[in-house]
Each structure stands twice: as C-alpha cells, then as structure tokens.
Image (cartoon, rainbow, N blue to C red):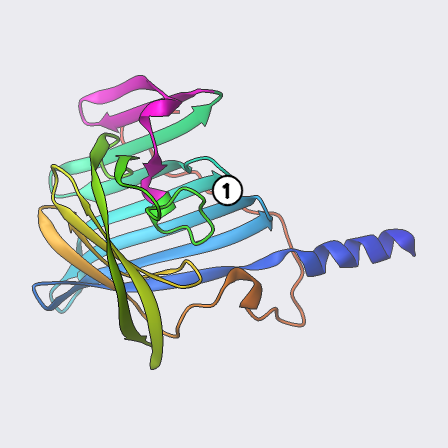
Amino acid sequence: MIVWLLLCSAALAQRPSHQLTWKLTADGEHLGWRVVEVSWPDDEHRVFAGHTWFEKGRRKRRTFEQHLSANAEQGRPASFSATLQRADGALEVQARRAGVTWTVTVADARGARTHSLPHTRVDLSSVDLFDPMSERGLRGRSHVRLLSAETGKIEEGPVEYLGNEELVIGGELLFTAVYRWSTEVGVHRYWYASNGWLVRFEVPLQERMVEGELYGGAPRSADEFPVPAAFRPGPIQVVELPSAAGVP
C-alpha cells in the first residue's frame, strides 16, 4: 500500500508534456511552422523536441527543415542535437557541456569537425530562447554570446529591453516584454509573456527575416497545464536523429 501511494504521488507531481506551435511568415506571406514539445521529468530538468520547416507551393514542398532534441538543467545553457536539411545539403550540429567544457561537432558533406569551448564563452544556446523556465534568458542581460543550433557557431551582440507591448494571442490579450538582440547575422526580436513563454519572434534565418507567432490558445505556466485524469507518466523516448556525415 505504501509503495502504491508513493507511485501515485510521483505521477501527480510530474507535469505532462506540452506542445507549442508558432506560425512562420516572411514578408507577410506564410512560410512554415515551428513546433516544440517540452517535457518535465522533474523540476530542475527539461527535455525538448523541436521541428521547424519552410513549405512552398500547393503541395507544401519543404525547402528547409530542422529537427532538434535538447536537454536543459537548472542554471546551465541547454545542450542540443540538431539536423538540418537545406538547399545546399544536410547539416548536423551537436553541442554538449561536460564540466567546464563545451564539445561542439558540426558535420556536413565534407565530414565532421569537432572543437571545444570553455563554458565561459557560452551564455546561452538557441534552446534557451524558447525555454519558459530558463534562468539564462535575455532578461537582465546587456550582452549575449549564444551557441547556435543552426550553425554550431557563437553569435554575439548587445541586448536591449524595449519595454512592454500588448499582443492578442488566441483571442486573449497578453502583456509581453520585448527584447532586441543585435548580432553580425542580423537583428533578433523576442516577445515574452509574463509567465516566460515566447509568444512572438523575429529572427534572421536562412537569409530571410522570419516572423513567428504562437498559434492557438494563449500560453499557460507549466503548473497551469491541465492534467488529464488518465495521465500516467511514462519513460521519455529518445529518438536517434539521422547523421549528416556518420557522426556517432
């Protein structure tokens, strides 16, 4: 009986996963979608599975596609593994921190290249910008060095807090905080709801200025997500992403 009660308590304590979808546009025209699912194995650990794609024409032919998996722990930038299908071929980017060192591997048709970075060179990774519980976002920062999941390179530049703006998302008026991050790649803008969820963004991606807006209902905090009566936590399935150049 005691074991059964402990198992039930653990099931109720663990949050269900939640999926967020952003509709992507460029120059006012539909471009594609970004979908991110967030899971919480515990209060200090988050797992992400992301899928971004551009589509074109009536048949919705995909001209760009990215699959991303990531792990975020309290107080550290998120480690990630990403595969990209671009017009010029496939690319794989893996970044993982062990101790005080980041190991970054970038693989394409020319092969795999691995280099190391001290942890002091990385303030954030791309995943942290979408993580509502990250302690390492743009808030309170004047300058950011970000490890990019699109290139495996460090993007760096000043951050400005632009104030607050009201947005209507899913028919609901939201009060957001707006940040601008300027890098050599271009100017990025991010709108965050008061509970930390990213509801809108403007970023340079694949040589285009891409706008993303949360699609569907307004976001809730992690503790506000409804838990289905039949919900039971299960093991997190890890899906091996295809390698662009045979990287293990």
In the picture, which quadrant includes the N terminus?
bottom right
Q: Is residue 114 rendered magenta in the image?
A: yes
Type of amino acid at the residue the image marks with label 1: Val
Residue 116: x percent and y percent?
33, 17
Left/right placement of residue 53 relative to residue 199 reads left
Q: Residue at x 87, y 51 (%)?
A: 3
Please state the extent of the stretch shown in magenta in the rendering. 100-127
Which of these two is toward me, 247 or 52? 52
- Does residue 90 appear anywhere in the picture? yes
Residue 26: x percent and y percent?
11, 61
Q: Residue at x 41, y 58 (%)?
A: 196
Left/right placement of residue 37 relative to residue 203 reads right
Question: Does residue 76 lie above or below 107 as drawn?
Answer: below
How many tags in the picture?
A: 1
What secondary structure is found at the residue carrying circle 1?
loop
Task: Report crowding for label 1: few under 14, some 14 to 19, many 20 or more residues within 10 A (C-alpha).
Answer: few
Magenta stretch, overall SS: strand
Residue 11: x percent and y percent?
71, 57
Judging by the rendered image, the residue that carries numbered circle 1 is 238
Question: Does residue 148 lie above or below 215 as drawn?
Answer: above
- Does residue 246 appear anywhere in the picture? no
Left/right placement of residue 224 relative to residue 111 reads right
Which of these two is toward me, 67 or 147? 147
Residue 77: x percent and y percent?
41, 36
Which of these two is toward me, 73 or 136? 136
